[in-house]
Image (cartoon, grey):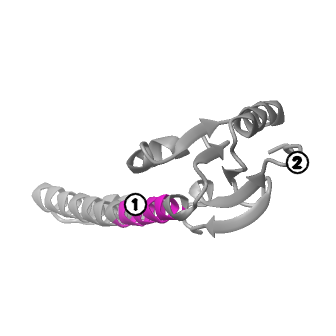
Amino acid sequence: PLLPALAALVAVRAASAERRARFVLLVACACGTLWSVRSLDLLHAKRELSGRILSAIAEDPRDIVVTDQFWLPTELGALWFDKRFFLVTDSRALSRLAERARSQGERELLVVSTPGQGTGLPTASVRDARFPAFSVDLSRLPLDTEAPPP
């Protein structure tokens, strides 16, 4: 936020209008370039985090993936034919899903949740300090007991 204000100040002090215009254009181009480089860096880091989450879930032997993260199923299109995804919003929904899975012979569910908010026994964690909202914990939820709340 400081760079554009500084550019404007220097432009006002420049000798001619043409010189001011060139300077402002130069600063605007520099700001745009820096912003683009930063954006590409963030995009690369987010794609890398998504890849790590995808790998962690793909390597997990459990077939049913349960999450309270609304964005997660859209990140896992590559696993569409390998895993079954369920979005749960509360403990009642999780209990109903666990009961249905248990009745169909499933022994465990994979729960993917916000770090520190998981249900079940922790198995893995995929975190990135730059993207705390997209960091997740993976845990297994055995179905031989009553399902605890998410």
Residue found 30% across the figure and 66% down from its top: 37
Question: Does the magenta stretch mainly form a helix, a strand or a loop?
Answer: helix
Q: Is residue 124 visible?
A: yes
Q: Position of residue 89 (x, y in %)?
A: 72, 34
Residue found 51% across the figure and 42% down from its top: 73
Asked if residue 107 lies left or right of residue 25, the reply is right
Where residue 30 sits, quadrant-wise, is: bottom left
Q: Which residues are magenta?
A: 41-56
Which secondary structure lies at badge 1? helix
How many discs appear?
2
The quadrant in which the C terminus is found is: top right
Q: Position of residue 10 (x, y in %)?
A: 30, 66
Of the image marks 2 and 1, the number of the one nearer the N terminus: 1
**Depth order, front residue of 86/125:** 86
Report how far apart the C-alphas of labels 2 and 1 lie in the structure. Answer: 37 Å
> What amino acid is found at the position of numbered circle 1 in the picture?
Arg
Taking 108 as reference, is 45 above or below it? below
> What amino acid is found at the position of numbered circle 2 in the picture?
Thr
Please state which of the two labelled residues, at mark 2 or mark 1, is closer to the viewer.
2
Q: Which residue is mark 2?
A: 145
Residue 54 within the magenta-colored segment of the rendering? yes
Q: Which residue is mark 1?
A: 47
Q: Position of residue 134 (x, y in %)?
A: 57, 55
Q: Position of residue 48 (x, y in %)?
A: 42, 66
